[in-house]
Image (cartoon, rainbow, N blue to C red):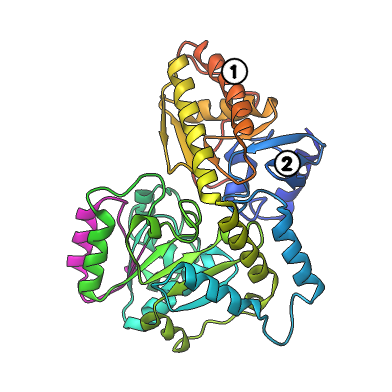
Amino acid sequence: MGNSQELYEKAKKLIPGGTQLLSKRPEMHLPGLWPAYYKTAKGCYVTDLDNNTYCDMSFMGIGANILGYCDEDVDKAVIDAVNSGSMCTLNAPEEVELAETLLEIHPWADMVRYARTGGEALSVAVRIARASVGKEIVLVCGYHGWHDWYLAANLEKGDPLSYVHLSGLEPKGVPSGLADTNFIFAYNDYARFEELVCKYRGQIAAVVMEPIRNVYPQENFLQKIREVTKEEGIVLIFDEVSAGFRLCCGGSHLKLGVTPDMITLGKALGNGYPMAAVAGTEKYMKAAQDTFISSTYWTEKIGPAASIAVIKKYKEKKVDEHINHIGTLVKEGLGRLADKYAIDIEITGINPLAHFEFKYEQPLVYKTYFTQEMLKRGYLATNAVYASYAHTDATVVEYLGAVDEVFHMIAKLGGGLPVLDGEVCHSGFQRLA
């Protein structure tokens, strides 16, 4: 065991679960072998506590670092904010500048509120929506964080959230009184959405959904939901925490041609610095004054300063075009190598958020093996590649060269299971002992 693995064993005794984010638990990737901690991160390269350097062809800060790690322009803006005082009794003027910038990008919106994480932003948006229309039920599609309003879905018998690909989330600690305030429908399942609207007509405050994630909308899915929510007086909230700034500057709905009532932004908005926002029409956003939404650290200067710098660079460098190009190269390359070695995989996701799944009886064994062998070749790699501005054509070529070697090894197994150096990775949000 290296220093990173030893520190993680210590962390599990001091921190419940070992980490603050389930997606960063080593068990999700390569139990016992994944380098859990980093010393430095720059561009798309990460150095662990044992001075091993890897190219990150996985999640790039769990989707936060769209420009790459330690971006000089964003860091300069943050350093200036720190040097001028990152917190004060008075407000940071960057709040107003960022609001103007976000509303310029999203001309349909009128007002903005801030938070520092995506989950917080969703809770703020749902609170505002419920306050504005005086109703409680929320219809939900996709993943939207850990807060009570969302996890309440699993107070219902069974495992409703598994319907949106998150199995085993226990609602322990969520008040039972929140049961029946949150109901789930899957992406592109308009029939289920329509069924819920009919069943709870007149009681629904909001629809919360990701406008896009792994697949594109089919049969005017988003347009039909927009029409129904308008007719029923339901607030349509697009969660752009993950998809935002991937297809274009701002929310993906701008590319998809469907205008919501509110959006939430996070992750890429700060390029690694904590920042999130809720933007929406005055009709609904003004209700934020009718309920209590307030937090000290939502007023610090670093987040807004970073976000302003991120948006400026994103526009200047046409980052959306670059990451779409990188993602296209990755997906095409994976497909080509899978065909070359007759590896059965399914490639999904919008180009900047590419995913692939091994279509075998024990897919997690193959996924773990892939990560294991790619790590030996100097890559943080799993079955997802989040493109960043720091990735180049050369980066992808070298990555695919390593994938070629690993796929060749898998092909030589002839359908047999690969030999792992440790345990099989966990799936989804499975509870860890």
- Asked if one can make out residue 427 in the rendered structure from this viewpoint, the answer is no
Q: SS for tag 1?
A: helix
- Is residue 244 on the magenta stretch? no
2 or 1: tag closer to the N-terminus: 2
Q: Tell me if residue 29 comes above or below residue 142 in the rendering.
A: above
- Label disc, if present, on residue 405 of the rendered structure: 1
Q: Tell me if residue 30 comes above or below residue 199 in the rendering.
A: above
Q: Residue at x 40, y 27 (%)?
A: 359
Mark 2 residue crowding within 10 angstroms, few (<14) / some (14–19) / many (20+) = many
Residue extent of the magenta highlight: 180-208
Q: In the rendering, at what x and y percent does residue 358 appear?
A: 45, 28
Q: SS for tag 2?
A: strand
Mark 1 residue crowding within 10 angstroms, few (<14) / some (14–19) / many (20+) = some
Q: Are marks 2 and 1 in contact (CB under 8 Å)?
A: no
Q: Which residue is mark 2?
A: 46
Under mark 1, the amino acid is Glu
Q: In the rendering, at what x and y percent does residue 31 appear?
A: 64, 35
Q: Residue at x 67, y 69 (%)?
A: 305
Q: In the rendering, at what x and y percent does residue 385 appear?
A: 54, 39
Q: In the rendering, at what x and y percent does residue 403 appear?
A: 57, 24
| Mark 2 vs mark 1, CA separation in Å | 22 Å
